[in-house]
Amino acid sequence: MDSKRNIQLRLLSYAVIAYMMLAFAWWSVLLYTKNNDAFAAKRDKMRLIMVAEGRVSSNEEFLESAPYQQLRDQYKRQEYMILGEAGVIIISLLIGMWLINRSYNKEMMAARQQRNFLLSITHELKSPIASIRLVLETFQRRRNLPIEKKDKLTRSALLETERLNGLVSDLLLSAKLEAAYQPHQEALDLPQMMEDLIGTLEGKYPEVRFHFRKETAVDCFVGDRTGMTSVILNLLENAVKYSSTPAEIEATIAQKQEYLLIEVGDQGYGIPEKEKARVFDKFYRVGNEDTRKTKGTGLGLYIVQQIVQAHGGTISVEDNLPKGTLFRIKLPISRTEPAQVTPEQAATN
């Protein structure tokens, strides 16, 4: 209903602007015509007076006279003013129509992203809560379960609890990034950190094959441990989510002359070219939430980009070969002090 009403308001605004453009065009034509008529009347009157006074004897002599030249220049200036003002008004209305269309598209995009977020967050919250409730109800109904069954149910409940905790952590971190994120500066061994996280994910996703390469010796990096953990974990889990089974995930760390290079690639579905620029937007997810099968809230890559930028780095997304997606992070190794992400910077990214 709201969408239909928005379309109706948009069409109404276009109709009003179109009517105003036609009205101003018509008024401009009338002014132009009246200006020419007034010029012709004054010209004829001036010629008759000058002929009667004997100041001119022919039409050619009248057209070359100074009074006529002044009169013609005066009305020429008025003619240019009419055409110029008409052009400015029409251009202003066209710009207004373009701004209305751009604002409408932004509002529709924001509404779509909010709807996607509400749908995804509802699913992400309900699913683990339902699983934990089922485990507790099973324990309540069947108190004499075998040890193996109890252990299996307990592990399942703990995994769902961890999933809930990760979701809440992402929500809190995204809110913190919007306010002001100040990285806690400490020495980090990023290759070891990535190995540890991959080891954790191998236990969580036993069907996924992770390949980690440290191409060159890497100096100790100074940054925020929690933030960089979130960056690596989000990229790895994102690669798992958007890969077909059996998933092949490749992670690389290398130190160049001026920066530290981190790459995470998959052989999955890939990202369409037109959506690559938007994957870092808050709440944005590739595809439609009604048909999407992968889990998520659209916060992961937004968090990754904000944390990377807070460390003075950049992140890009490219097509992987032969298929899939490759995320490439460049972190300056000469930094001594992390930057702070302000609310204005977060709003523009």
Image (cartoon, rainbow, N blue to C red):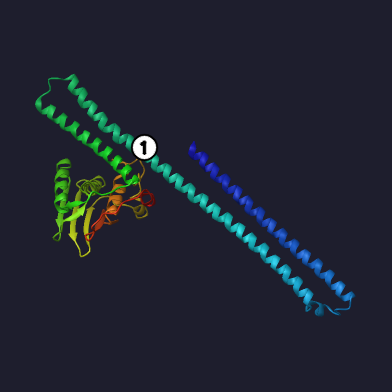
Query: Crowding near pointer 1: few (<14 within 10 Å), some, many (20+)?
Result: some
Q: Residue furthest right?
A: 52
Residue plotted at (33% across, 34% down): 122
Q: Is residue 320 visible?
A: no
Residue plotted at (18% across, 33% down): 158
Residue 136's place in the image compared with 18, above or below, is: above
Residue 176's place in the image compared with 60, above or below, is: above
Image quarter of residue 66: bottom right
Image quarter of residue 292: top left
Residue 74 rendering spot, x and y as whole percentages? 73, 69
The residue lying toward the viewer, choosing from 152 and 345, is 345
Q: Amino acid at mark 1?
A: Leu
Q: Residue furthest left?
A: 147
The residue lying toward the viewer, choosing from 208 and 282, is 282
Q: Secondary structure at mark 1?
A: helix
- Look at mark 1 in the image and give the residue it sits on: 118
Residue 125 rendering spot, x and y as whole percentages? 29, 34
Residue plotted at (37% across, 40% down): 116
Relative to 153, 178 lies left or right: right
The residue lying toward the viewer, choosing from 12 and 82, is 82
Residue 150 rendering spot, x and y as whole percentages? 13, 27
Residue 114 rendering spot, x and y as whole percentages? 39, 40
Relative to 69, 19 lies left or right: left
Looking at the image, how many numbered discs can be counted on the residues?
1
Residue plotted at (25% across, 32% down): 128
Q: Is residue 41 visible?
A: yes
Residue 255's place in the image compared with 70, above or below, is: above
